[in-house]
Amino acid sequence: MRIPTPAIERLPRARLEEMHDAAETVLECETVLAKSGMSVVSEVLRGQGDFLTWERYPRGDVFDTETHCHYFYHAHDAREMAQGENGHFHLFMRPEGIIPGLEPWDLPGARIPEDGASRFVHIGAISVDAQGRALRIFTTNRWVTDECFYRAEDVIRLLDHFAIELAHPNWAVNLWLSGMVTLYRPQVEALLRARDAQIEAWLAEHPGSDVLEDRGLQNITEWPVDHVAQIGMLEDQLDL
């Protein structure tokens, strides 16, 4: 399900400026990588052998133990991805290390580890083409990510803290991912809220089903990425 365009004119100026700064970071990372003959795709796959469907790259994922954030890149069968999609980055956070005490969403079929430190939540995924150009941002249910589900409003509280502050596998890739979450923050929030609404509607229509594992609901909400449109909206609001 595609969501409507979020109303960014309602955002405080400080948030708009933060998003504009993130746009500069995203564009700079894309430019520097391209000038170097690289991309966000080439760098997560570098030295990893053949690019295989469902394998996670780079091997072992990327974990920032200080920010409690991590990600991996992978691809599904082409029939399960967007047109032109090479793969996507799945982005995660560990709530207990950021805002202790957040309670998971106790949905039917939920698997909630007793140890809070073992709980991780998927904040969204970013699809890219073979050249590393972002195509869409989307949310999923659990069968792909094996996450511990939290309600959208709790996940949104975590978003200010998303950052991958590592040089591995490539510093520009990590800056790009961090910047994308900030640049498209209103869309990420809207995607998460719409995800919750879709899950609740699915439960009402399919009583007794395991909504978290239902492959018919694997990609719940999505937003097509458009840097030009996003930056244009920001500059209109900031009078730049």
Image: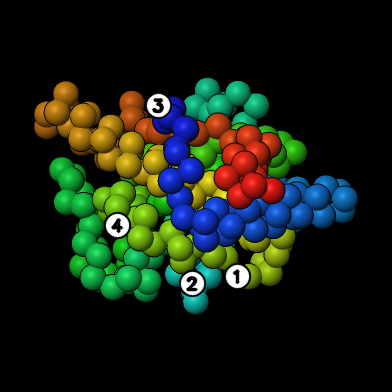
Name the residue tied to disc 3. 1
Q: Is residue 227 above or below residue 95?
A: above
Alpha-carbon span between mark 3 and mark 1:
32 Å
Disc on the earlier residue, 3 or 1: 3
Quadrant in the picture for residue 135: top right
The kind of residue tagged 1 is Glu
**Residue 154, label in figure:** 4
Q: Residue at position x 43%, y 29% from top? A: 4
Question: Which element is circle 4 on?
Answer: helix
Question: Which element is circle 1 on?
Answer: loop
Circle count: 4
Disc on the earlier residue, 1 or 2: 2
Q: Nearer the viewer, residue 36 or 109?
A: 36
Q: Residue at position x 70%, y 64% from top? A: 171
Disc on the earlier residue, 2 or 4: 2
Name the residue tied to disc 2. 67
Label 3 Cα neighbours within 10 Å, binned few <14 / some 14-19 / many ≥20: some
Alpha-carbon span between mark 3 and mark 2:
31 Å
Q: Is residue 177 visible?
A: no
**Residue 165, label in figure:** 1
Disc on the earlier residue, 3 or 4: 3
Tell which residue pokes out farthest to the bottom in this image. 66
Check if mark 1's residue and mark 2's residue have beta carbons within 8 Å.
yes
The kind of residue tagged 2 is Thr
Question: Residue 83: x, y in percent?
Answer: 60, 23
